[in-house]
Image (cartoon, rainbow, N blue to C red):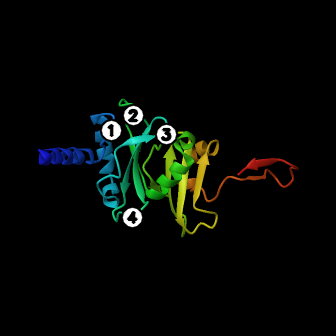
Amino acid sequence: MKSAAVCLFALTLSAQTTVDIGSGSVSETVRQEFVRAYYRGQFQNLTSLPPLGDVKRLGSTGLVQEFPDAAKTNNVRYALVRATSDTTQEGVFQLTPELYTYFTSVGPNTAGYPTTDTQTCPSTGSLVCTFQLFDKNYALFVYSAGNSNGNNFNVKDPFYTRWRSVGIGSLGPALNAEEAGLVSPLATGATATV
């Protein structure tokens, strides 16, 4: 009798610890979106399985599932993020560890949710940069090395809309934070954000 109870406990425990891509999603449709996003591009080659946990809430409406990197380095997390649990909307996007860390520090209430996967910045000379676009007219930039101004910057409105209309290829990525500057050296006290 005692061994039957132990077997039942072991079976229940193993069923509870099974985590897979998209597990814990609000529906099978959403789970399949997480699976498709995981296997899009090179994401599956940069990460390892199993995921670090089930799909969980991110902000007030979003969903996220985190993955270890291929080497299973401590505190390095890739993420798949969806803006809503509403099954009539689609879109699960990939975030690299540096961008995911910066995004979580900014937060979905400020930046919104991603509208693209993490992308490599266009040529910035010796600087190595990635960026991602978000639905509250925000772009986040992360430099892995070489930028003496820092590593993490954003572009938000009113600059975001102009930057998007001209294109990152024309204006380039943000190289430093917004700051107050003079409109003209001839205009006394007239400042603007640059």
What type is the residue that disc 3 sits on?
Gly
C-alpha span from label 4 to label 2: 30 Å
Q: Which of marks 4 and 2 is in front?
A: 4
**Residue 137 placement, left or right of 190:** left
C-alpha span from label 4 to label 3: 26 Å
What type is the residue that disc 4 sits on?
Thr
Q: Work out whether residue 167 can be spotted.
A: no
For residue 160, which quarter of the picture?
A: top right
- Residue 127 image offset from top left, x and y in percent: 54, 67
The mark that comes first in sequence, 2 or 3, is 3
For disc 4, the neighbor class at 10 Å (few under 14, some 14 to 19, many from 20) is few
What type is the residue that disc 2 sits on?
Ser
Q: Name the residue under label 2.
A: 85
C-alpha span from label 4 to label 1: 26 Å
At 42% across and 60% down in the image, what residue appears? 76
Q: Quadrant of the N terminus?
A: top left
Q: Name the residue under label 1.
A: 25
Task: Note whether 71 is above or below 141 in the view shown.
Answer: below
Q: Mark 4 points at which residue?
A: 73
Secondary structure at badge 2 equals loop
The mark that comes first in sequence, 3 or 1, is 1
Secondary structure at badge 3 equals loop
C-alpha span from label 2 to label 3: 11 Å
Secondary structure at badge 1 equals loop
Closer to us: 17 or 193? 17
For disc 2, the neighbor class at 10 Å (few under 14, some 14 to 19, many from 20) is some
At 44% across and 38% down in the image, what residue appears? 62
Residue 149, which numbered label? none
